[in-house]
Amino acid sequence: MNAYLHRVHYYLPETVRTNEDLVKLNPTWSADEIFRRTGIRQRHIAAPDETSGDMGVRAAENLLAESGIDREQIDVLIFCSQSADYYIPATACVLQRRLALSKSCAAFDVSLGCSAFTYGLWMARSLVLGGGARHVLLVTSDKMTQYCSLHDMVTAVIFGDGAAAALISADEQGALATIGPSVLGTDGRGAESLIVPAGGSRCPRSAETGRVTADANGNLRNAEQLYMDGTEVFNFTLSAVPAGIRRLLAEIKLEKEAIDLFLLHQANGFMLDALRRSMKLKPEQLPIDLAEIGNTTSASIPILFRRLVDRGGITPGMRCVLAGFGVGYSWAMTYVTIQSSPDAFLQHGS
Amino acid sequence: MTEFRRSHLGIRASVTVEFFNCAEGRCALEPGADLRQHDEENPPTMTFHDVIDRIAETLQIPADQLNLESRASDFDAWDSLGTMSLLLMLTSDYELTVPQGETQKLLSVRGIVELFERAGRLS
């Protein structure tokens, strides 16, 4: 028995924030320098009243309309986000109603960021192979810009908002890809390197946590906003990602040369280029597609995947390694093989 | 010849020997070739001056402006991107690992030298 990836779709908010927009707010910054450092020219920004749940619904509706699956058939809804609509209840429960899914559908949230999609594939595959579900709807959605100070160059230039949805099924008919094994990992020592320090139970919001301060590099933010130690995160990435991929390749008994595509979380251009260099991969093996989107955290891998499909960059029989990594620290790598005879979706996109 | 060596520090000993054995001081290897393909079992060992040269090359600042007391705050080019470039150089070219929570060492020449020293890679 196998678990299959049937469809992937996504949603990006209409509003775009360019590097030039950021420079208007921060006259000492340079649009060209932002691009040189990140490989990002613009990012999509959710509307003030648009939530991760809203974006997730849009992505899921795009997917459901395209796949034609009967909503009553979906057994499980997994909603992954670090910016859920509520503390209580789970956003997945709200989405069950908004997407008109069956009342017998299990629905739950997963609080993970950049590793969420590959964690989700692992969970969905496990559910399918274990017989607990036949059709799983995996939604990853994040409104990270709500946590970013517009005057913090570490985060404001990187993150964008977006959502993606994937349908995982036990049915081979019409499938796009077979989901293979995953390797996963966690290192909680990195929790404070990428964190919103205040606003939860550990440090509730207060007048003090809302006070804006400047760090050593002149970045302005308060404790309710996202803090990222870029060098520490980069250090983690350079060790965990190649090691995780090596573990996966050992498990599936393939050399890296046998992998057509390494679809990595689109963190930033510098980091991806560094990983490509570190792992000694050919440029065409590790696509980078974030110039017009930015880092969409939990949605970045499925957005990359779908955009490659639409451009003809994914073809029948391809072997792919998907790798999510980031906040936590948390990482997950999943092996996926494109079907040898996928339906028209792959040949033409849609 | 000196210039050639300085721009390709980190090469394995065998490659260095090959270079110096080249007839009439000329080497078949093009100056632009990447010579940093070292033997995984015999990673390159560096002198203090080698380390200075690699920091200078990575940050694109003159090597003669660097000494053991130099710090990131002394140079515009040694900003966050420069620091990450140094980290990439250490991990990719020398397979050095910087322990979690110790990336502050990348903000000074002394710290970087310590990383080589701790790994037994400083001669």
Image: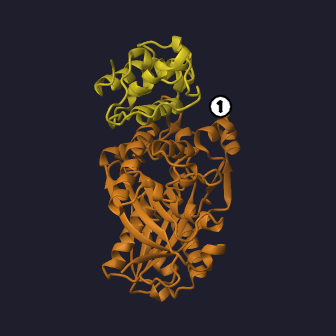
Residue A288: x %, y % from top left: 58, 52
In terms of depth relative to the viewer, which is nearer, A89 or A290? A290
Quarter of the image with the N terminus of chain A in it: bottom left
Looking at the image, residue A251 lies above or below residue B6: below
Circle 1 residue: A28
In terms of depth relative to the viewer, which is nearer, B27 or A260? B27
Whether residue A271 is visible, yes or no, is yes
Question: Would you call the spot at circle 1 few (<14 residues within 10 Å), some (14-19), or many (20 or more)?
Answer: few
Q: Chain B appears in which tint? A: yellow
Amino acid found under the numbered disc labelled 1: Thr
Q: Relative to A107, is B53 on the left or the right?
A: right
Residue A82: x %, y % from top left: 44, 58
Q: Chain A appears in which tint? A: orange
Secondary element type, mark 1: loop
Q: Which residue appears at 33% of the width and 31% of the height?
A: B42
Whether residue A350 is visible, yes or no, is no
Residue A239: x %, y % from top left: 38, 43
Looking at the image, residue B90 lies above or below residue A59: above
Chain to which mark 1 belongs: A
Q: Which residue appears at 63% of the width and 38% of the height?
A: A36
